[in-house]
Amino acid sequence: MTSREDSSPCGEAAASRRDFVAAVTAVAAASAAAATGSAQAQAGPNVRHSNPSGMTQPTAYSQVVEVNGPHRLVFVAGQTGVDATGKAAPEFRAQAVQAFENIKTALASVGGSMDNVVRLTTYMTDLEQNADVYREVRASFFTNKSALPASTLLQITRLANPSFLIEVDATAILPPRA
């Protein structure tokens, strides 16, 4: 009588299950290691978070995140019509101008300018009433008409503070730091 361990199909199936479990375990371990590496890379020396002077100093987020690599990606948090003292401008045009001035200040803090902006996302509470003014203000900050940033304009019901009428976030690409 032969035992099942010698050459039965059940022995092959058991070995295949063991191989499968071992492979899945190895993949899971590799994924965990990669995820840990990604988290460390995000907080590594190539990423800098800042709250430049001349802007409000939030405690819950960074106004600017700069990623240095073959080029620098700079992410500017959503800017409202609030000046460095935290005071909101009284009307839409002044808020729009202040939001773009805040973006200019943020970019200057990392050696950039509005010419480096490649993407804008704008949130407004009343497109019907303010879209034309917004487009006029935006155009005044982007003078190189052959290299305008990609742009998305959205109407929302409300921003974080009811007195805010506009919020603009920006992404810029700059040369690497030396």
Image (tube, rainbow, N blue to C red):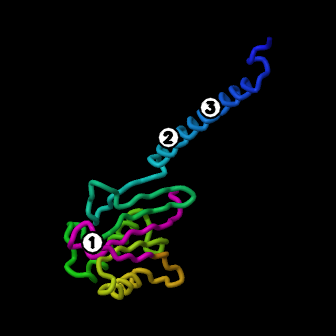
Amino acid, disc 2: Thr
Q: Helix, strand or loop at disc 1?
A: loop
Q: Is residue 154 magenta?
A: yes
In the rendered view, does 95 fall on the left or right side of 132?
left
Q: Helix, strand or loop at disc 2?
A: helix
- Mark 3 closeness class: few <14, some 14–19, many ≥20 residues within 10 Å: few
**Which quadrant is home to the N terminus?**
top right
Q: Quadrant of residue 12?
A: top right
Instruction: Give the Cα separation between the discs numbered 3 and 2.
Output: 23 Å
Residue 111 percent location from the top left of the image: 43, 65
Q: Quadrant of residue 107?
A: bottom left
Q: What's the mark number on residue 158?
A: 1
Q: Earlier in the sequence, mark 1 or mark 3?
A: 3
User: Which residue position holds label 3?
Assistant: 21
- What is the span of residues highlighted in magenta in the rendered image? 152-178
Residue drawn at x 35%, y 73% is 123
Question: Is 14 rendered above or below residue 108?
Answer: above
Instruction: Give the Cα separation between the discs numbered 1 and 2.
Output: 37 Å
Instruction: Give the Cα separation between the discs numbered 1 and 3.
Output: 51 Å
